[in-house]
Image (cartoon, grey):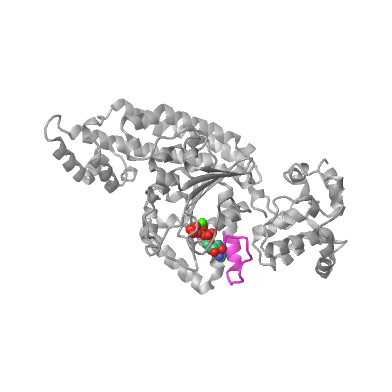
Amino acid sequence: MSIRRFWSSPKTLGDVSVVTEELKNLYYKRLLSIEKHYSFHHFHSPSYEDADFDNKPMVLVMGQYSTGKTTFIRYLLEEEFPGSRVGPEPTTDCFTALMYGEEERVIPGNAITVDPKKPFRNLDPFGNSFLNRFQCVQMPNPVLESISIIDTPGILTAAKRKLSRGYDFPAVLRWFAERVDRIILLFDAHKLEFSDELTRAFGALYGYEDKLRVVLNKADRVDSQQLMRVYGALMWSLGKVFRTPEILRVYIGSFWSEPRLRCDHYELIELEEEDLLTDIRNLPRNAAVRKLNDLVKRARLVRAHAHIIGYLKQEMPTIFCKDSKKHSLIYELPVIFTKIQQQHRVPAGDFPDCTKMQEKLLGQDFSKFKTLKPSLMSSLDKLLTTDIAGLVPLLQQQELKKKSLPAVLDGEFLGTFRRDQFREDPFKEMFKDDEISETDCDEWAVEKYKPKYDEIFYNLSPQDGKLSGTKVKEWMTTTHLPHSVLAHIWKLSDVDRDGMMDSEEFALAVHLIEGKLGGHWLPRELPSHLVPPSKRCSTSSDATV
Ligand SMILES: Nc1ncnc2c1ncn2[C@@H]1O[C@H](COP(=O)(O)OP(=O)(O)OP(=O)(O)O)[C@@H](O)[C@H]1O
Ligand SMILES: [Ca+2]
């Protein structure tokens, strides 16, 4: 099954925007004024803007260098993207936001941060050394119609890190972690390492563990015994750095479109990969829930923050010894946190990291802080208890509707789908724009190899001139290409969509497999010179049935 075929159509997301609009309203009307009043943006993240609510779900791909981040993204997109390089040494030194665009374009960091339609306007406080290492790649890739993907520079081991990056790498990661829907953290099963920079980067993910999916990549490079050891070591190390390691889901996989190595856990890899892809595929549907979650998290942090600032202001003397009082208050911050928790019943989990807060407070003029304003606080409580809760039924309605949608077009690869089910569906789209002209009908690029492919075809004992989907699948699997690649090949070669393959379609499939094994990228859609002659005229008329 091709990955792309799984994205839910953006049309089905109509109701999501109702919830999103409502969230936007609540943020601007209620939360933003409180954030401004208590200088929340100096301490935590910048204010949200329209684009933060309207953007497509984002997936942040991060991990140690050479764990296969860029390769993973290429695998999802089923194509290379401008400026992407893969290699055994650290290759990516940029944050790259991959977004949908009709035309392929690379936009440098400084230009993206001034575009109000992009959700990156608030990145400019990270400075030029970061913006020079940030770019947006727009391309007309169907996967990007549903999600945006962020490729990140590899996290280096101490030995590799000769120079500091020139910007606050963990802070940038945290900025993204707050806004993305999914964080994919890759590890190399073949070479598991935990550097100090990696541990620091984990600090950036505190509070966003729910978005995290860990991938033990290149799992076909190790035998089962090694895999078990590496898995155990990974869980142990993760347990040391995350507060809630038990909720972390670790997927085992080998995410690239090259043939997978034979190993005892080959099937496990297939299943795990499929699980992760399903999770990513469902992001557009869960986007509104994610936004609601993040808004609640933010509102709770704002509440804790307002109490802290209010308390500090109230403790400050009006005229004398301001500076020494400020320092003693900073020193006592852990105690102050506990006092606020007890007096105002603010949960400990809502508070920011105490050490970071102390660092930030050092540079602040406490006399400019605002006292606690009861009206603002009760508005904030209302937001949390009533207003946001009011959106839950809307989300539930949407949830019910979702169930009636085909989540994934399973069976496409197996040829087991009911054809009538998909009469209306996207297959037609593929051919609609691709009307085959008379001139294209001349030569079929596969023709000269067909006798060779026919041998395999007839060896598989076709019935009535056709092979069933199951038989073809069995044969295709012996090539050890990943399931998703084979599914894409199936999609391209079952031209008449009958879930079976005649000798021409089969020849086309084998031809594409050979091309893939020879290191070529698969075409997104079947170019006219590859359409089997017998399908050329009938295809266009099929499409209008
Ligand atoms: N599933 C896989 N199995 C085996 N090798 C892989 C796999 N995925 C990637 N590789 C190889 O690992 C190396 C690193 O891949 P890639 O450049 O994609 O990693 P990266 O995490 O993006 O690295 P960097 O942090 O340097 O940007 C490359 O040589 C690539 O071919
Ligand atoms: Ca990379």
Seen in the image, is 402 located left or right of residue 417? left
Q: Residue at x 74, y 52 (%)?
A: 417
Q: Residue at x 68, y 60 (%)?
A: 520
Report the span colored magenta.
253-272
Q: Is residue 518 visible?
A: yes
Seen in the image, is 84 located left or right of residue 545? left
152 or 178: nearer the eye? 152
191 or 298: nearer the eye? 191
Q: Position of residue 86 (x, y in %)?
A: 54, 59
Prevailing SS of the magenta stretch? loop
**Count of numbered tags:** 0
**Farthest residue toward the left?**
320
Q: Position of residue 364 (x, y in %)?
A: 25, 37
Picture quadrant of residue 478: bottom right
Is 322 one of the magenta-colored residues? no
Q: Position of residue 296 (x, y in %)?
A: 41, 38
Q: Residue at x 43, y 38 (%)?
A: 122
Position of the C terminus by quadrant: top right
Position of the N terminus by quadrant: bottom right
206 or 107: nearer the eye? 107
Is 254 one of the magenta-colored residues? yes
Residue 39 in the image: above or below residue 199: above
397 or 187: nearer the eye? 187
